[in-house]
Amino acid sequence: MSLPGKVQSAAPGLLGFDANTVISSATAQKFVGDGYKFCVRYLSRSTPEPKGDLTSGEANDILAAGLALMAVQHVAPAGWTPSAALGTSNGVNAAANAKSVGFPSSVNVWLDLEGVNNAASSADVIAYCNAWYAAVQSAGYVPGIYVGSESLLTSQQLYSSLSFQHYWRSQSNVPNVESRGYQLIQLYPSLTVNGVDIDVDVTQNDYKNGQVLWLAK
């Protein structure tokens, strides 16, 4: 069953958070009271979703509280090795899990790019990312990419070698995306708010006036 709400473009300057913790209805309401407008929660690299990752029940609670919602897929432990085959497999699972939660088509589903094995080539990273993009896009979602530390890609490669149009900047020291920039900015430092460990995020328009696409009631 699809989640309630509709896919919307995010206005710039809105405050939100990403968290690797289940957000209850009561906690989501507290975040709304604190001025947060959106939440990003995690999907697994495997199917079905294990305990602790986003479920349809949690997603409904978050949306009902008044937070917009997106999902990002867990990255493998630091030192992982990218390939096109792995990108396809992870992308298929990201899309399947997003569908099981109830996300409608056209919402951003995010790839977490960080902690890549330094022995990998930039070509391997590019192949992984573009295969992931193709798998998620073919399922009807709009792929986005979180650029974290040790992505192994340059500013130019992030823009010209990848298929993505939606970029999320981590709090780490990472390259800008040449010619496009970022639509979502993760702030430093991480915080504990309402008993939840979070990273704070802020929306903005990129250089091409692109915006994040999220689900909101």
Image (tube, rainbow, N blue to C red):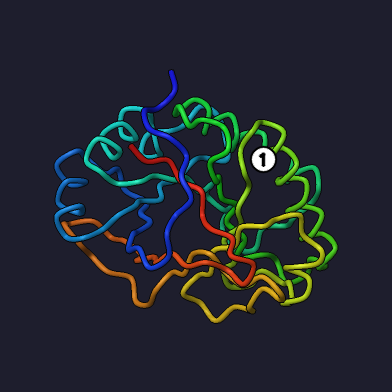
Judge left or right: residue 60 versus residue 205.
left
Q: Position of residue 112 (x, y in %)?
A: 57, 56
State the residue position of label 1: 91
Which residue is pictured at 49% across the width and 64% down the height? Answer: 184
Count of picture labels: 1
Residue at the right extreme?
A: 123
Q: Quadrant of the N terminus?
A: top left
Could you say where residue 128 lies in the image, as x and y percent from the top left?
76, 52
Is residue 110 rendered to the left or right of residue 156? left
Q: Residue at x 67, y 73 (%)?
A: 177
Above or below residue 1? Residue 20 is below
Q: Residue at x 56, y 50 (%)?
A: 110
Residue closest to the eye, 158 or 189: 158
Q: Is residue 52 left or right of residue 64?
A: right
Q: Amino acid at mark 1?
A: Gly
Query: Element under label 1?
Result: helix
Determine whether 122 is above or below 135 in the image: below
Q: Nearer the viewer, residue 135 or 8?
A: 8
Which of the 4 quarters of the picture holds residue 88? top right
State the residue lying farthest toward the top.
1
Local crowd at mark 1 within 10 Å, few (<14), some, or many (≥20)?
A: many
Q: Quadrant of the C terminus?
A: top left
147 sits left or right of 185 in the view:
right
Q: Position of residue 34 (x, y in %)?
A: 16, 60
Above or below for 172 versus 32 = below
Residue lying at 53% horizontally and 64% vertically, measured from the top left = 183
Task: Pick the residue in front: 11 or 97.
Answer: 11
Rendering quarter of residue 159: bottom right
Q: Position of residue 95 (x, y in %)?
A: 60, 34
Q: In the rendered view, would you say 95 is above or below 176?
A: above
